[in-house]
Amino acid sequence: MIIGIMGIMMSGAIYAPLNPNDPLDRLESLIHQVNAKLVLVNRMSHSYVSKFSVPIINISEIVESHNSLNDTQIKQLSQVAVTPDSICHIVFTSGSTGTPKAVQIRHRNFMDYMKTHVIQTNDIVLQLISSSFDSHLDEIDGALVRGAQLILLKPGGHFDFDYVTQTIHDKKVTYIGPVPSWMNALGKFLNENRHAQERVKAVRCWYLGGKEKKELNV
C-alpha cells in the first residue's frame, strides 16, 4: 500500500483509497463515482477485484520483477506538474445515510493539515487505521512527510494485542494514533495482562481521534 501511495503521488495522480473488504458492488460504485482510470492492487486483493471494468495493476508483481527505471522514465517523473491547488486525495464519507460521497483534498489543504501534527522526524509511527478512514493518511503521509519511520502490522493483526504490544516494544514505537474504541480495547487488554504494560511505556504520544468516546479504559 505504501509503495502504491508513493507511486501515485510521484506521478501526479490522485489517491482514492478503497477497502478490499467492502462488497464488490460498493467498490465498483465508488470507482465509477470518482471516474477512476486505474486500480492498484496487490497479490492478496487481485483476484477479488479482477472483474472491475477499469484497468488493474498488480503492485506485487511489479515489485517482485525487480525492474529498474531507465533514465527516460526517471526524467518523466521529474516533469510531473503538480500545484498546491491540485487534487491530492479523494476520500469517502462513511455512507451511513446512503451511498458514500467523495470529498476532494487539495495538496495545499493537506500540507497545512500535516503542519498541525505532532509527528517528529525521529518518531517511529505505528500504522493502525484502515484505508476505509481518511485518518490512515495522517499516519502514512504524516510519517513520510516528516521523515519518520513507519511500522506496518501483519494483515488482521490490529486486534491481536499481544502481537501489537510486542511489536510496539520490539520496534520501539513512539507515536500511535488510534481511534477511541481501539484504545479502549487495548486498555482492557493491558489491565488484564499487566506484564504487557512495560511494552508500551516508550510510546511518547497517543494521538486519539475519530468518534467521541466519553470514557476511556486506559
Image: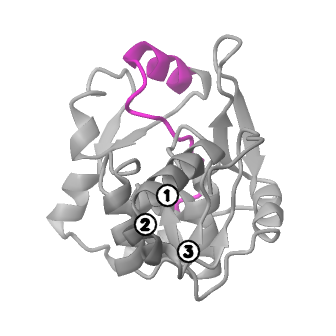
Q: Quadrant of residue 82?
A: bottom right
- Report the residue marked by disc 3: 78
Magenta range: 11-32
**Cα–Cα gap, marks 2 and 3:** 52 Å
- Residue 134 visible in the shown view: no
Are there few (<14), some (14-19), or many (20+) residues within 10 Å of tag 3?
Answer: few
Q: Is residue 137 above or below residue 79?
A: above
Which quadrant would the C terminus be assigned to in this image? bottom right
Which quadrant would the N terminus be assigned to in this image? bottom left
Residue 191 lies, in percent from the top left, at: 49, 58
| Badge 1 vs badge 3, beta-carbon distance below 8 Å | no
Foreground pick, 35 / 59? 59
Q: Secondary structure at mark 2?
A: helix
- Report the residue marked by disc 2: 194
Q: Secondary structure at mark 3?
A: loop
Residue 42 lies, in percent from the top left, at: 28, 46
